[in-house]
Amino acid sequence: MAYLLKGVSILGGKPTDLHLGDDGLITDRSDDKAEVIDATGLVALPGLVDVHTHLREPGREDAETVETGSRAAALGGYTAVCAMANTSPVADTAGVVEQVWRLGREAGLVDVQPIGAVTVGLAGKQMAELGAMATSAAKVRIFSDDGFCVADPKLMRRALEYVKAFDGVIAQHAEEPRLTEGAQMHEGEVSTRLGLTGWPAVAEEAIIARDVLLAEHVGSRLHVCHVSTAGSVEVLRQAKARGVRVTAEVTPHHLLLTDEMASGYDPVFKVNPPLRTARDVDALRQALLDGVIDVVATDHAPHAVQDKECEWSYARPGMLGLETALPIVLSVFGEKWELIADRMSIAPARIAGLAGHGGDLTKAGSPANLTLVDPSARWVVEPGGLASRSSNTPYAGMTLPGRIVATFLRGEATVLDGKAVK
Amino acid sequence: MIKHLRSAADLDAETATLILDTAAEMAALSGREVKKLPALRGRTVVNLFYEDSTRTRISFEAAAKRLSADVINFSAKGSSVSKGESLKDTALTLQAMGADAVVIRHSASGAPHRLANWVEGSVVNAGDGTHEHPTQALLDAYTMRSRLGRLDGLRVSIVGDVLHSRVARSNVLLLSTLGAQVTLVGPPTLIPLDVAAALSPSTKVSYDLDSVIPDSDVVMMLRVQTERMQDSYFPSAREYSRRYGLDLPRMRNMPEHAIVMHPGPMNRGMEIAPEVADSPRSTIVEQVANGVSVRMAVLYLLLGGK
Ligand SMILES: [Zn+2]
């Protein structure tokens, strides 16, 4: 179906009419049969792209499925998500990545782009068949052992080199495992008070420093997942200044929350890497503004109730993110629409190699992947009201700015009037 | 009165002093013929122990029984996380049993905080992971006060594996609240980060036991697990003992009035020499006896006994 978005503001610009053709492309021709949407006061952004999502299927369908996660994504303004490989079975073969890819197509709410594991079973020992995943129907380009660090330097070097053959990228969960044995939260003043084993910032920074040197040495691309410390920002800043081909992401929660949130031992605030200090939060915000950090990625990590309603040390790390990412970014940075479009759509689409996403909405012929935001709307986060199958949001009860009114995937509405169409 | 005792930080100076004063009354009463007081008759105290600690459990059990409370011992040890009932389900069971207070010992830091969300009764932390052990700090403070007559201005050195010690955290918080000056002593690997900011601004740190000893009114030795050396916190038991153990020569450098404390169980020959542990300066046996009086006071005050 064709749509006419009347009076929409593209990236905060002057109100205009935006035509979405029934061929799924943006067009400058009007169509009498187009459904007219009054978009007065709404801002159009290119559909958001998440390079770091946990959809949990196959294996933990009680926490999330490709379908429920896709719905949460569409409601959050996303048109594409990259599904992390730490499923059960692990997405370390062409068969599993194709299964996830197919489930995404069937759900039809966002493009689900599987990420392949770097090593067999995420065990960090033997390289998975990266080439087979790259040439599969899922056309995998990002490889990650996320949840685990590819800690072995030789294996990391080889993986960085190997994926050059098909323009792949290794997305590293930077955590030196020997420095984080038993770690429960950021190592610092609060961990001392709470008697929880610390996760020192240097465990992240040391791996990033090593990896940018390895990437430089072999001339490969490196992507750093969920950067969380001020020290990591400095390492990245220097590497980029030297011309190392490194990109990096930051999560909405690391842009807003601090380790003080752990004080009540509520595991909804347990996440890996852990929430850091206010100083780290400031450095991450500045790095995103400067472009030292390229993208905002959710690290959307649904968990079943029993995995969070327990002692802090026994809880699984991770928090929901898809439905709150844009509102959090809006609340942190305000209505910087160009910045938001770049960091949440254009740059992540480029990193993930998703050509149809992050396009120019003013250009006829671009795929009609976009989302409409009402920046003046305020809403209260209710865990039970989210579309995700899980409810482990750290923002429960918070009033957030910005409501997603509609999302279009190749011209088809996936969200209308703030509700998923299916 | 506060409802829960999850951390020594739950206690302000007034409340802490009330507990110590009440403990003194309890001790006086226990000295008489009739050891049982009717204060908590008809009230139920549950000892929920996820870790083996016979001494702490017996101490709480004796305290509750001397106040005529009904005591239920609920040993959850062995019910592993994967197989066993969740803490929440256990809490709901205890709630249904009408527990007025739950005394919890758990290997996970913060377990008492979680439990307090799920039960209506009072929660008393009897040691949680590497976090706190507030009744131990109360009985230590009680012991110091009875031996030395005051807490305000007292110079207390806590020596050993502070990083993993719930006793140390609770002691720093409580003693600072009551005006004592605490110095933490140990190898840098076993002193947590930012202790002054995290616990109390007056807290000092030293890596040199010999320099601290002559200026200490109290030297409290912490148990050091020998497994720590496998994790590179220190090279060997012998080196640890030489640098941070309290032996006779070191004890002779303490001021004449100064006392030696240990929360137990001790590694004799490791952090404390047997001659020191058994010396008249040592309060180790008193600490055990005082534990019952202090826990009586805590239960009595939390449950609003009459
Ligand atoms: Zn990760």
Image: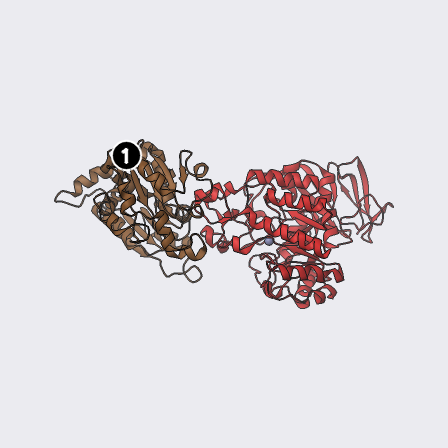
Residue under pointer 1: B18
Quadrant occupied by the C terminus of chain A: bottom right
Q: Is residue B276 above or below residue A130?
A: above
Q: What element carries label 1?
A: helix
Q: How many marks?
A: 1
Which chain does the brown colour mark?
A: B
The picture's colour for chain A is: red
Residue located 66% across and 59% down the image: A157
Task: Indicate how the structure is coloured in the image.
Answer: by chain
Q: In this view, does A333 lie above or below B243?
A: above
Q: Residue A124, position in %: x, y?
A: 59, 62
Q: In which quarter of the image is residue A13?
A: top right
* Foreground of the two, B281 or B302: B281
Q: Residue A57, position in %: x, y?
A: 61, 61
> Does residue A345 appear anywhere in the picture?
yes
Residue located 26% across and 42% down the image: B252
Q: In which quarter of the image is residue A134?
A: bottom right
Q: What residue type is labelled 1?
A: Leu
Q: In this view, does B180 lie above or below B136?
A: above
* Foreground of the two, B50 or B133: B133
Q: Is residue B110 above or below residue A169?
A: above
**Direction left: furthest residue:** B33
Residue located 46% across and 40% down the image: B194
* Marked residue chain, label 1: B
